[in-house]
């Protein structure tokens, strides 16, 4: 069993507090993301538990740059790395428990693990989570969804820590959910969610999850280095249809490629940089705009700094 070690790390003009979890300076991030690319985080913090995280946040000065990552899906870390502190919520904040027809989950719990836990406890209605990559913390932030359902359909409440480490309980109707979005302050860190299902037969639940797995394997490049769906669906349209109509299937840039299996997925074929992936995504957006007049919005969260020479903003995109 591993043991948490107290570490003190210093950034320019500020000494980070001592913690019970792990603080790592100049920490590589590529191994923490599905794409397998990206520069180093100035400092990576992996809290031992919620109390450790709350104390850490309370000790930071106002406005200190914080970035939160979970399972590493739906995120692209740029090649220049991430400024400030990157907080990684994983297994230590991934607990699972039941209360009647509800499951209380830590923000670091994977969607797939939640679905399996529900099945094992005879709680139905959460099977769709098995088709969503990543962890529930990120799922809350983007109102993740799959197969006709979204997190907002099953959420009872969420708990988050604000900039000062204070805890807040946020009821579902106060989350400000919309398509792939929630309105909770982006600086708050989700630490827990309460999900409501319904009583069901564990065998039937497992069967539905198996069907979802088969469907995903047949229609998505799940065995490659990818980050999940790349672009949001425009109102009344499908992003993948627009991308395909623009002739982007199999399009390449460096080690990045538009998946031939599902064109709304970018994949790292080996040796791609974050600039390859983001640049390819921008080329897809440009071609879709020229072909259809529709500007695709990124669903994958792009974080961190560009290396010199990268041009992130497309001149045709008024929203850039």
Image (spheres, rainbow, N blue to C red):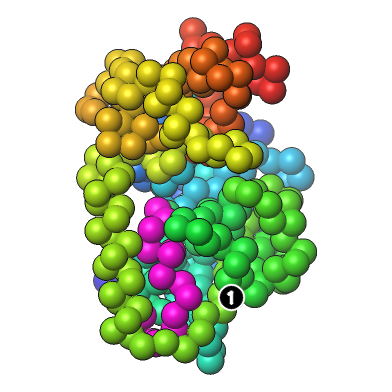
Near-viewer residue (283 or 165) = 283
Count up the numbered dots. Answer: 1
Residue 53 placed where, x, y %?
A: 58, 61
Residue 7 placed where, x, y %?
A: 47, 53
Q: Residue at x 29, y 55 (%)?
A: 215
Q: Which quadrant is the C terminus positioned in?
A: top right
The answer to whether 271 is drawn above or below residue 165 in the figure is above
Q: Can residue 125 be found in the magenta stretch?
A: yes
Q: Quadrant of residue 102?
A: bottom right
Q: Which quadrant is the N terminus positioned in?
A: bottom left
Q: Quadrant of residue 257?
A: top left
Q: Residue at x 48, y 28 (%)?
A: 242
Residue 275 placed where, x, y %?
A: 42, 20
Q: Quadrant of residue 65?
A: top right
Q: Can residue 13 be found in the magenta stretch?
A: no
Q: Residues within 10 Å of mark 1 (few under 14, many from 20)?
A: many
The answer, for residue 205, to whether it is visible in the render is yes
Near-viewer residue (302 or 223) = 223
Write the start and end of the magenta stretch as one range: 119-133
On the picture, is 20 further left or further right than 189?
Answer: left
Q: Residue at x 29, y 23 (%)?
A: 250
Near-viewer residue (290 or 183) = 290
The answer, for residue 225, to whether it is visible in the render is no
Element on which disc 1 rests: strand
On the picture, is 105 further left or further right than 72?
Answer: right
Q: Residue at x 25, y 58 (%)?
A: 214
The answer to whether 221 is drawn above or below residue 286 in the figure is below
Q: Badge 1 is on which residue?
A: 194
């Amino acid at each position: 069993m591993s043991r948490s070690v107290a570490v003190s790390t210093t950034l320019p003009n500020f000494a980070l507090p001592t913690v019970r979890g792990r603080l790592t300076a100049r920490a590589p991030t590529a191994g923490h993301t599905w794409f397998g690319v990206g520069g180093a985080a100035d400092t990576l913090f992996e809290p031992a538990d919620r109390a450790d995280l709350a104390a850490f946040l309370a000790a930071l000065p106002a406005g200190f740059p914080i970035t939160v990552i979970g399972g590493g899906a739906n995120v692209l870390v740029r090649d220049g790395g991430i400024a400030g502190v990157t907080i990684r919520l994983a297994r230590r904040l991934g607990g699972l428990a039941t209360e009647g027809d509800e499951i209380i989950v830590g923000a670091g719990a994977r969607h797939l693990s939640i679905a399996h836990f529900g099945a094992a406890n005879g709680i139905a209605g959460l099977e769709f989570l098995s088709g969503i990559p990543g962890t529930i913390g990120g799922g809350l932030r983007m109102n993740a969804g799959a197969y006709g359902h979204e997190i907002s359909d099953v959420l009872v409440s969420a708990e988050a820590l604000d900039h000062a480490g204070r805890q807040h309980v946020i009821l579902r109707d106060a989350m400000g959910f919309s398509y792939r979005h929630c309105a909770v302050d982006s600086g708050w860190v989700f630490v827990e969610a309460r999900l409501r299902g319904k009583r069901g037969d564990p065998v039937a639940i497992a069967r539905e999850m198996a069907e979802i797995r088969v469907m995903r394997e047949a229609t998505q490049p799940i065995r490659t280095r990818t980050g999940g769906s790349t672009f949001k669906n425009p109102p009344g349209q499908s992003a993948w249809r627009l991308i395909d109509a623009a002739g982007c299937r199999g399009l390449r840039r460096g080690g990045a490629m538009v998946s031939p299996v599902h064109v709304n997925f970018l994949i790292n074929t080996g040796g791609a940089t974050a600039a390859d992936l983001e640049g390819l995504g921008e080329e897809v957006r440009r071609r879709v705009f020229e072909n259809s007049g529709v500007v695709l919005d990124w669903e994958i969260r792009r974080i961190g700094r560009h290396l010199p020479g990268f041009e992130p903003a497309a001149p045709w995109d008024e929203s850039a």
